[in-house]
Image (cartoon, rainbow, N blue to C red):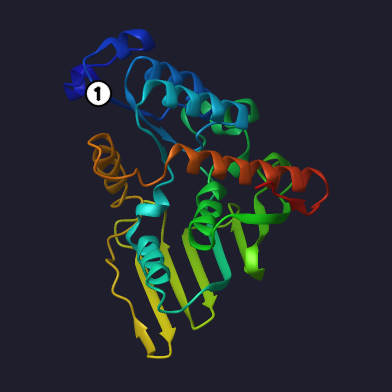
Amino acid sequence: MQSEWGVAATTGLQEFLSWPCEAVIVVSPNYLHTAHGVAALEAGKHVLVEKPLATTLEDCDRLLDAAARSGKVLAVGLEMRVFSLFSAIKAVLDSGEIGRPLHLKLDLWRRPYRAGAGGWKSDPDKLGSSVLEEPIHYLDLARWYLGEPTALQAWANSRPGREVLWENLDVRLEFEGGASALVTRSIAAFEHHVALELVAEEGALRASWDGMMDVDLEPSVALTLHSERGTRVVEVPQQTGHAFDVPRQTAAFLEAIAGRAQPAATGQDGRAAVALCLAVEDSLRAGSRRIVLSG
């Protein structure tokens, strides 16, 4: 990398952390997030950890404790929050235009995952859980839109030989006041399609993102809102998604370092997302048992 891009590179963690930089982005395989993140925080760096924050709640707490001791910013790469489409939906909900959300349907239909360098995403010891790989983003969106869930129940199946991936996954979430969400996904399909429908007390909305893959440069994007004022199309940039919006997450991280704002997703958000994913695993391994979530 140093010769090709003119960027300093090393395979030594301590050498890297000795360099004069203020912040670190941890994008190593999931099982290394805690070790790398804690080391960076203890070296006095602000840290943005790619999702998941960690693969266990104990390791999430190690990172949160290290951030508290260091006084540095700990942010998490739950980047769907900064995608123009999903942040536009959040703005509608926060405006109160359609009232309190009652029911959310959020579906991902896509081609199988890339294997990761050396195939680490196929190794449960390194991945932690397939639910931590991409469903975590959509479970986090449900929490972002509707608040803290109180219970969940999950169902899944897979093609033969791929059982560890829970390829076809359905998760039902319950919330205070009777609201609910259904988060579904298939990674045994093709292309990359996201569909979101939300019904609230005073209106409803529907959104979609369609492309050949997650980094499609020309996706088809739509957001339609219905309320007492009628039905209207909400203007959303067509250039939204992984290929365009991730820099907004880094910008929010830099604003947090400067003390001007919170990260797009905090360390506590990261822990809550991991807790949801692990509860989904608990439900699946218990034969789709309903799991009551602690407050």
In-front residue for pair 192/15 = 15
State left or right for residue 280 relative to residue 27. right
Residue shown at the point (34%, 27%) measured from the top left? 72
Q: Position of residue 35 (x, y in %)?
A: 49, 18
In-front residue for pair 63/70 = 70
- Looking at this view, name the residue that lies furthest to the left: 6
Answer above or below: position of 122 versus 160. above
Answer whether residue 12 is visible to the viewer in this image: no
State left or right for residue 63 relative to residue 97. right
In-front residue for pair 250/71 = 71
Residue shown at the point (32%, 60%) measured from the top left? 84
Residue shown at the point (36%, 25%) measured from the top left? 71
Which class describes the residues within 10 Å of circle 1: few (<14), some (14-19), or many (20+)? some
Q: Which residue is mark 1?
A: 22
Q: Quadrant of the N terminus?
A: top left
Q: Give the residue type that dot 1 points to.
A: Glu
Q: Position of residue 3 (x, y in %)?
A: 19, 17
Answer above or below: position of 48 versus 252. above
Determine the secondary structure under disc 1: loop
Q: Position of residue 70 (x, y in %)?
A: 38, 21
State left or right for residue 182 relative to residue 208. right
